[in-house]
Image (spheres, rainbow, N blue to C red):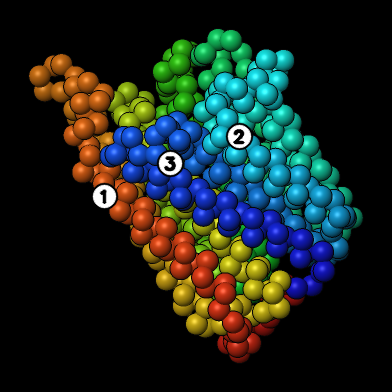
Amino acid sequence: MKYESQKVAMPYFIFALILFAGQIVFGLVLGLQYVVGDFLFPEIPFNVARMVHTNLLIVWLLFGFMGATYYMVPEESQTELHSPLLAWILFWVFAAAGTLTILGYLFVDYARLAELTFNEYFPTMGREFLEQPTITKFGILVVVGGFLYNVMMTALRGRKTVVNIVLVTGLIGLAVLWLFAFYNPGNLATDKYFWWFVIHLWVEGVWELIMGAILAYVLIKLTGVDREVIEKWLYVIVAMALITGIIGTGHHFFWIGPPEYWLWLGSVFSALEPLPFFMMVVFAFTMINRRRRNHPNKAALLWAMGTTVMAFLGAGVWGFLHTLAPVNWFTHGSQITAAHGHMAFYGAYVMIVLTIISYAVPIMRGRPYGNSNTAQVVEMWGFWLMTISMVFITLFLTAAGVLQVWLQRIPESGEAMSFMAGQDQLTIFYWMRFVAGAFFMAGLVVYLGSFFIKGQASPAEEVRGPATADA
């Protein structure tokens, strides 16, 4: 580790992993409630468990992105972080706000929570994924604003790199688009139109910039390939991600009332959205094949490769499966959507955060070449357990979605089966999804356990060509 202030990333990574574990626990609760409807009722009803599950996902990924930024930017800028103290203060503010919000969901009736947090004066609550109380939303805005100030002051006074430029651009976009979380029009169609400016343009827009920057940084460190080569790839990937992602927002506008041209724009540009993810696969494997060094941290390299493949499958292939308007007419809101969402989030964002954690945490613990070989083997077992489990979760949800569409939306008799009767026919898939989720939890436990194994990897490595300054 070159700069002392990079250590401020550690609490962000640790708290992110704690929240990740909590998210999976509530995912298992939800999976069981699908088949045992009164499980934990009325203590934790389904709507509350789902709200906690999705909010934990968003918050822990934000902690992961912030930790990655605090680790990467000083090294990329070749200067210490502008204010490590500010980074620590913002960590505790964000951690406290996030924890209190989750406790509020669990122990306070949602309507009462809205009253206690003065939602009537500035109504923003009640929308899917944006359920946070208004004061929490303002808290997130303050934290992100302070975070951006700290990062940009560091980047501006140091070396300017493409990785930093792309990363900071993505973070600025994240902050700006969050402002739409405060816009809550009375018309439901208008609300949904702008609601997607946060939800879609985060996960299929600016978050892809953050993902690309982290992937490029890790590949520079692990492969020793010339920075200029990786930066050119990054520019092309980012351009494709923004072009397809921004206009591709239209696939959410199909059935909420906007003009008919969104059927064409949404279909065409959404069909192109797999391209940047496919380019990431080609990019990562090309850089690894051209590597000038065999870095001892094999686990981090596995996470980097796995990220690109799973992101392409989840966000690209499974997104394309139901993104064309003529297909989406039948599949919209089915379990196929859930299948796409699970694999896309895991592949694109969960895995990229785990990639930077796998690379950076050993270094911050005084292990510059990575954890010991034994620890890495255990970590890779965790990788395969979680990844294979997510593949099965996706397949089971896809099968459930196909059957759901067949029973409810294109019945042979001409009369659609009722929703609850249709759900009853999907029980076997929900049970299999729950079992796969339990294996995923086991994989996470194995992954977390790898960090408690002592020792570090050997510094021995094979150099294939002249080392670069960034290697």
Seen from the viewer's position, the closer of residues 284 and 435 is 435
The residue wearing badge 3 is: 341
Q: Amino acid at mark 1?
A: Met
Mark 1 neighbour class, 10 Å CA radius: few under 14, some 14 to 19, many 20 or more: some
Residue 133 relative to residue 414: left or right: right
Quadrant containing the C terminus in the rendered view = bottom right
Residue 305 is situated, as x and y percent measured from the top left of the image, at 48, 64
Residue 312 is situated, as x and y percent measured from the top left of the image, at 44, 51
Residue 164 relative to residue 296: left or right: right
Question: Looking at the picture, does residue 143 appear above or below residue 372?
Answer: above
Q: Nearer the viewer, mark 1 or mark 2?
A: 2
Q: Residue at x 61, y 62 (%)?
A: 356
The residue wearing badge 1 is: 432
Residue 332 is situated, as x and y percent measured from the top left of the image, at 35, 27
Mark 2 neighbour class, 10 Å CA radius: few under 14, some 14 to 19, many 20 or more: some
Q: Which mark is residue 104?
A: 2
Q: Residue at x 13, y 16 (%)?
A: 414
Secondary element at tag 2:
helix
Q: Determine the image quadrant of residue 79.
A: bottom right
Seen from the viewer's position, the closer of residues 268 and 448 is 448
Q: Is residue 325 visible?
A: yes
